[in-house]
Structure formats: C-alpha cells, structure tokens
Image: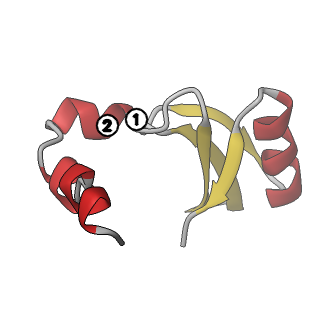
Amino acid sequence: MTEKNLENYVNPTQILKRLSVQDFRNFGVGQIAYVKAVKGKLGTSYEVCSADGETLYSSGRKELAMVMAKQNDLEPVVTH
C-alpha cells in the first residue's frame, strides 16, 4: 500500500465493531439464507432462515431447502 492509500484505508474490523445489534441482525437480509438441520421426534428437517433468524421454509431434505432458497433469490449458506 502506498502512503496515499493508507490515508484513505478504513479497517473493516473497526466498521464491524461499530454496528448496532439491529444493524448486525440486518446484515445480509434479502441476500443470504441460512440452512440449518433441526433434529425432531420424526428425524432431521432443514430450516431455511433469513439473515435475521426468521424461519422462512422447512423441508425434510437438505437439497430441497437449498433449492428453495435459490428460487427466492437468496444465497444459501449451510450452518453447522
């Protein structure tokens, strides 16, 4: 980095530290869907959740949950 570039450099960590709880919850809303496995009495199902944690869909198959996210213009991310 040149000296001139350093003048305009903003540390991304510092920006993230300034996010409010609500800003952090909204991070990725409308863009990302989290696919998580949920164990129940009848076996494992897969929930598609928005970035703010709201459950959007539920499916008995992980692959179908991923497709459902993509069909709604969301990028699926699998949680562990």
At 56% from the left and 65% from the top, the residue drawn is: 79
Residue 63 picture location, percent across and down: 87, 57
* SS at badge 1: loop
At 78% from the left and 26% from the top, the residue drawn is: 72
Residue 66, above or below 71 = below
Q: CA distance from mark 2 to mark 1?
A: 5 Å
Residue 74 picture location, percent across and down: 70, 35
Residue type (three-letter) at the residue carrying disc 2: Arg
Q: Is residue 69 left or right of residue 78?
A: right
* SS at badge 2: helix
Residue type (three-letter) at the residue carrying disc 1: Asp
Residue identified by numbered label 2:
25
Q: Quadrant of the C terminus?
A: bottom right
Q: Earlier in the sequence, mark 2 or mark 1?
A: 2
Residue identified by numbered label 1:
52
At 36% from the left and 72% from the top, the residue drawn is: 1
Q: Nearer the viewer, residue 63 or 61?
A: 63
Quarter of the image for residue 73 reads: top right
Residue 63, above or below 30 = below
Residue 66 picture location, percent across and down: 80, 49
Check if mark 2's residue and mark 1's residue have beta carbons within 8 Å: yes
Residue 50 picture location, percent across and down: 53, 35
